Image: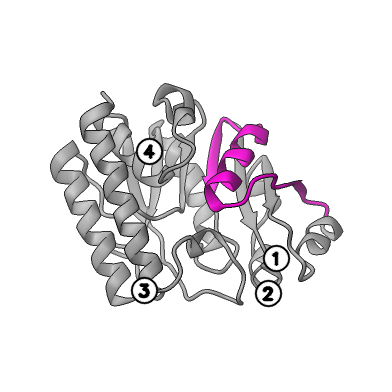
Amino acid sequence: MKTTLLIPTKNEIEGLKVIMPKIKREWVDEILFVDAGSIDGTLEYIKENDYKFIIQKTPGVLSAWWEGFETSTGDAIILFSPDGNSVPEVIPQLVEKMKEGNYDIVIASRYIKGAKNEDDSKVTAFGNRFFTGFINFIFGGKYTDTLGMYKIFKKELLTKLELYKEKDTHFEVMLAIRAAKRKLKVTEIPGDEPPRIGEGAGASRAWPGFFGKIKGGLSMWKCILKEIFFWR
């Protein structure tokens, strides 16, 4: 099983300097950056360290994921935030767990026993637990963390679950819901979420500010309702 570590960046130089030295290249088969026009030295850092990268063509976190998916060569993809929210040492644990149980998805959960979340506000903590509980209740999942980005999944799921048809909505939520509906083999391991480093625009900053989070919540409802009524 070949693995790709997929990292979206936009002005993440502070985080990269702290995080990337902790990542051993032999942990995965490919490290792929998707850069969205950084102007703070991020792209220069990526080039200087001889990492594979592509320049993002369409704005937005979802576009970064999908352009990365299309370029990646791994059989399994690890979604990774470069702003300190993703703990590097969890990478080999995700890979080993997937190989050990031939899982379709392994999630680095921020809420499972043994993990701690140092980046939650009261609003995000409530939202994460509420939506995860609702998804479990409606779709029969057994998740503790459906909104977290940090996970490894088989690339074939992009086709198997028809995710390629839904490039404009919440990828993590759709993946969790459709995996539950199809009763795929999914598990979780503890994955701490430390405070963010720097002022970049990593994947975890998709909905900044209070009103941004409200907008994100409404968008989440739209996604979930669509999955209830229109996808089998």
Q: How many other residues sit within 10 Å of disc 3, few (<14), some (14-19) or many (≥20)? A: few
**Residue placed most toward the observer, 189 or 225:** 225
- Residue 130 image-quadrant placement: bottom left
Cα distance in 3D space between marks 3 and 2: 25 Å
Cα distance in 3D space between marks 3 and 4: 25 Å
The label shown at residue 21 is 1
- Over which residues does the magenta segment extend? 50-79
Cα distance in 3D space between marks 1 and 4: 30 Å
What amino acid is at disc 1? Pro
What amino acid is at disc 2? Glu
The label shown at residue 210 is 3
* Mark closest to the chain's N terminus, 2 or 4: 2
Cα distance in 3D space between marks 3 and 1: 33 Å
The residue that mark 2 highlights is: 14
Question: Residue at horizontal 70%, vertical 65%?
Answer: 21
The residue that mark 4 highlights is: 175
Cα distance in 3D space between marks 2 and 4: 30 Å
Question: Residue at horizontal 26%, vertical 42%?
Answer: 224
SS assignment at label 1: helix
* Mark closest to the chain's N terminus, 2 or 1: 2
Question: Residue at horizontal 65%, vertical 35%?
Answer: 72
What amino acid is at disc 3? Phe
- What is the quadrant of the C terminus in the image? top left
* Mark closest to the chain's N terminus, 3 or 1: 1
- Residue 124 image-quadrant placement: bottom left
**Residue placed most toward the observer, 209 or 43:** 209
- Where is residue 180 shown, x and y percent of the image? 26, 34
For the residues carrying marks 3 and 1, which lies nearer the camera in this image? Answer: 3
